[in-house]
Every structure is written in structure tokens, then in C-alpha cells.
Amino acid sequence: MEDKLITEHAGTRRDAISRYYQYGSGGVRVLDTRKAIKRLYLFDPSSGIMTERDPLRQDKILRRFVFDRYGMLEETFAFGTRPRTFRYENGARQIAVREGGDYGAVGKIITFEPNGITETVWGRNGEIEHVYQVDAREDAITIRKGGWYGDVERTLGFAGMGASLFFEPESFLQFLMFSEWSEKDRDEHVSDRVSEIRGGKAAPGASPFAYTGAAVKGKAAPRVQGSRNTGKTPRASHDDTDIDFIPEADGPAVENSRKQVIFSRQSRDISYQERRDRDGGGSGGLPPGRSAGIPLEERFGSSSREPEQLSRGKSAEIPLDERFGNAERDREKKLSRGKSADIPYEERRGGGSR
């Protein structure tokens, strides 16, 4: 069997390549973007075992995966790392992932559904963590985060082989093992990206994320609106771009809405004397505020005036007798006898003794 190359993108196929997988009958080599081997998996079909080896010392086993008719057992040889078991359930349409062995707590449930595979995390009230879907042409597997309509986290493109091969339970477990990202893998990937950005590939002063498309012959490349070059700083020497670089201190002084001059220079380049001269002739004091133009009489005159008399309310015109006479008349009325007073006492007692 000829080795096939699986390409992984950090997102959709339009996003950057994050890893490669060289898949063959002997095993899988996980490669970084520079095609350096990061992880190595070897198959032993006769015993149903897949082992993860140290890429520098291939005789050293880091992990071992034992497949049987019940599922898969992961054996780890790293100190402090807990093993996992993957057991088939519901006629192999589900896989229960237990942390710490056969009797550990169920951490995840992997379910094979008509439209794809869901990975449900029990630790967060049974939420779907990942969804694995095969494209219609069966040449890619899309991994979404959070559900069927979640964001695309990774896309793996399969050249010369069908992606649906890995949607059988045992093949999917192999795929899950060699394609997973550990915390160490993520840290190394971030470090590599930082090294590339700091490696000086972009010209000094030019953004590494600027337009880099080659200009069409006979037609100038697009220019950024408002960009210019005053001659103070040489233009960035790109062969494939016509974007001018505007460094700091390249713009003139401008005025804001208050007619105050705004300099584009950095504050460390403005001398102390220049700052004092701009502040009201070098007096060193703050300019008076607008409130200083309001006379004191206008400010505090209202507080010295006589207090205004409040008008009498309409209720003051109602006589007291009219207000409280109804209450006195109500107290003089006699209450009527209730209907229960007409029921003889014997009849009342007899009803209660039955």
C-alpha cells in the first residue's frame, strides 16, 4: 500500500495548514508544517495493536493501543497519565470513553449517526463537544466545535483515499488517536508560529498580514487609501506589492474640533520647552474654564431670594364635618343579623354528631 498524505487545516480548507499525516500500511507519521516528524504510530495487524513510538528512538514505546471485539484499551507509559478505555455499546453504534480504565467514570460518548459522528462530553451536562462529518465527495473530514452548526475547528483533506474509511468504529478509534491534539502539541504549534513571525520574513516596517498578491503586468497593485510617502522614509522593498509604508512621525500636525494642534510625533520627541510654549505663553498655569465668565450674582443670586409661598391645596376647602361625618354615621348603624342566626342550636349540633 502506497503512503497517502492527509492535510490538516486550522479551520476550513482556505485556512492555513497546521499538520500533515503520512498514512500507510506500516503506520502513521504526524508531520508539522516543515514536514518534520512530530509523532509516529506503527501498526501490528496480526496482534491488533497500534503503538506510539518516540520519533528519535523508534524502539521506545510511549503508548500502546490494544484492539479487541469489545473496543480499544489505551496503555500509557508516561508517569502521571491516566489510561483510557473505549468500549462499544448499542451494537457498536456508540463508544463509551472511560477515564482510568474499565471501571473509571464515563467522560465522553461517541455516537455514530447517519450524518456523522458526535462526541458528547458528560462533564458539561451532556453537551456536544465535536462533530465529525464527511464531505459529499468523501475527500475530507470536517471537525466542528459545539454542534452540527458550530464553527469549523479543523478540516482534514484526504488525497487518493476515501475519508469514509475512518467512519467504521475501529478505524475511527485509530483516526481519533493519531489526529488528536495534546496540550504539548498546541504549545509547540504556537511557538513555531511565533518563531515564523519573528523570523523577519516580512520587510522591516511592513505588516506580515498586508496585501502580498503580485501586481498584474501593466497594472499597478492596489494601494491603501490614504497611504503616501513623503520621502522621509524609503518605501518597503517588496517585489510583489505596491503598498506604501507610513512610519511614525510621517504625518503633519493637524487641528481638532477645538482648534488644538495635534502632533503625530511621539511624546518622547517633544521637548519640555515646546510643551511650555504651547501652554498659554509659558505661564505654566492652566487656562481659565468657561464657568469663570459667569458673574457671581448670576450664580448665587437665586439662593438669596425670598422663598416662594406654596399655594393651598384644593382639599383645604372641604369642611371637616364633610370629611369625617361619614365615619361617625357608619359607627352609629346597627349590624343586621346573619342568616346563620335562624338555624336552631339543636340542628347545628345534630349535623356535627352524624
Image: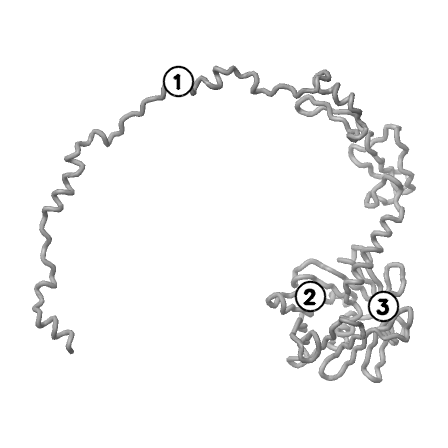
Q: Quadrant of residue 167?
A: bottom right
User: Marks 2 and 3, Cα distance to the nearest angstrom?
Assistant: 24 Å
Q: Quadrant of residue 71?
A: bottom right
The nearer-to-camera label among 1 and 2 is: 1
Give amino acid for label 3: Arg
Q: Does any portion of residue 113 appear in the rendered image?
A: no
Residue behind mark 3:
39
Residue behind mark 1:
305
The nearer-to-camera label among 2 and 3 is: 3
SS class, disc 1: loop
Earlier sequence position, callout 1 versus callout 2: 2
In the image, residue 310 above or below residue 242 = above
**Residue 347: where, in percent of width, then height?**
9, 72
**Residue 85: where, in percent of width, then height?**
72, 77
Question: Is disc 1 surrounded by few (<14), some (14 to 19) or many (20+) residues within 10 Å?
Answer: few
**Residue 314: where, in percent of width, then height?**
25, 30
Residue behind mark 2:
131
Q: Quadrant of the C terminus?
A: bottom left
In the image, residue 316 above or below residue 106 = above
Give amino acid for label 2: Val
Give amino acid for label 1: Arg
SS class, disc 3: strand
**Residue 217: where, in percent of width, then height?**
91, 41
Residue at the image point whose x is 12% and y is 75% from the top: 350
Q: Quadrant of the N terminus?
A: bottom right
User: Marks 1 and 2, Cα distance to the nearest angstrom?
Assistant: 77 Å
